[in-house]
Image (cartoon, rainbow, N blue to C red):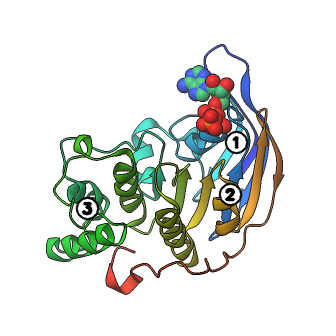
Amino acid sequence: MIRFENVGKRYGMGAEVLSDISFTLEPGSLHVLTGPSGAGKSTLLRLLYLDQRPTRGSVQMFGHDVTRLARRQLPAFRRRIGVVFQDFQLLDHMSALDNVALPLRIAGDLPEERIQGFVRELLSWVGLGDRLNAKPPTLSGGEQQRVAIARAVIGKPDLLLADEPTGNVDPSMAQRLTRLFVELNRLGTTTVIATHDLTLAESIGGARMQLAHGQLLAVGGGGGAPRVAGAPVPPQPADFGGF
Ligand SMILES: Nc1ncnc2c1ncn2[C@@H]1O[C@H](COP(=O)(O)OP(=O)(O)OP(=O)(O)O)[C@@H](O)[C@H]1O
């Protein structure tokens, strides 16, 4: 369970960009975070990723008050979180395959041969089967976004955070990626997807978290995602073991 209580966030000496944010995310719940540009969606995702600290309030995650963690404790928590941020945060010197393999290699649970098999299958599924060895700077924005999504989901994280995850792809790929998120959520990953795209929000389902001017206007229960009609079926968990 994740619990925010009266969380406020300001950058430097600026005004608060988030004020008195309180909510609970139940394990395995699915939430779509909406709100106008500048409302604080990315800031909220960065607080959830422990990439920013709140300036007030408390945040409970994975059984800990994470506002009290030492910097050296953060990587272990972050390994439980898959992220797709707008800047993708891919490692430019590594191939697409190696970027996506990284969470499984760090986890160290699977032999390299199986890791390679799972990564190839997932990258093929997101339409990048012919770009396995390409490095991120040689990929288009939409291709980089799909590598980032594959990297975020391959290890079946406890929490998935995605910021405008389909902003750079065409509608049919957006539907395919939505299916991936929904299926991951069905396997138990608590999921928060920020988007301006109301079609995406509708197709994901789940509960809305609505931000405006740094205030959370609504947060629902977020239980269970509907099937995405007509979308292709992603690789099943047994087919890519990290999943
Ligand atoms: N690193 C930063 N330093 C200073 N101010 C920041 C920083 N990041 C965000 N802000 C400010 O915080 C406010 C909320 O920004 P944020 O990116 O969280 O909004 P958003 O809802 O994700 O917007 P968008 O939909 O345009 O991505 C904005 O006023 C922005 O200028």
Please give the residue where the numbered disc 3 appears in the rendered image: 101
What type is the residue that disc 2 sits on? Val
Q: Which mark is residue 32?
A: 2
Residue at 59 percent across and 65 percent down: it is 190
What type is the residue that disc 1 sits on? Ser
Where residue 175 appears, x then y in whole percent? 53, 68
What type is the residue that disc 3 sits on? Ala
Secondary structure category for the residue under label 2: strand
Where residue 212 sits, quadrant-wise, is top right
The Cα atoms of the two marked residues, 1 and 3, are separated by 34 Å
Secondary structure category for the residue under label 3: helix
Mark nearer the viewer, 2 or 1: 2
Where residue 243 sits, quadrant-wise, is bottom left
Mark nearer the viewer, 1 or 3: 3
Secondary structure category for the residue under label 1: strand
Where residue 58 sits, quadrant-wise, is top right
Mark nearer the viewer, 2 or 3: 2
Q: Which mark is residue 170?
A: none
Q: Earlier in the sequence, mark 2 or mark 3?
A: 2
Where residue 230 appears, x then y in whole percent? 57, 81
Please give the residue where the numbered disc 1 appears in the rendered image: 58
Q: Earlier in the sequence, mark 2 or mark 1?
A: 2
| Quadrant position of ligand 1 | top right
Question: How many other residues sit within 10 Å of disc 3, few (<14), some (14-19) or many (≥20)?
Answer: many
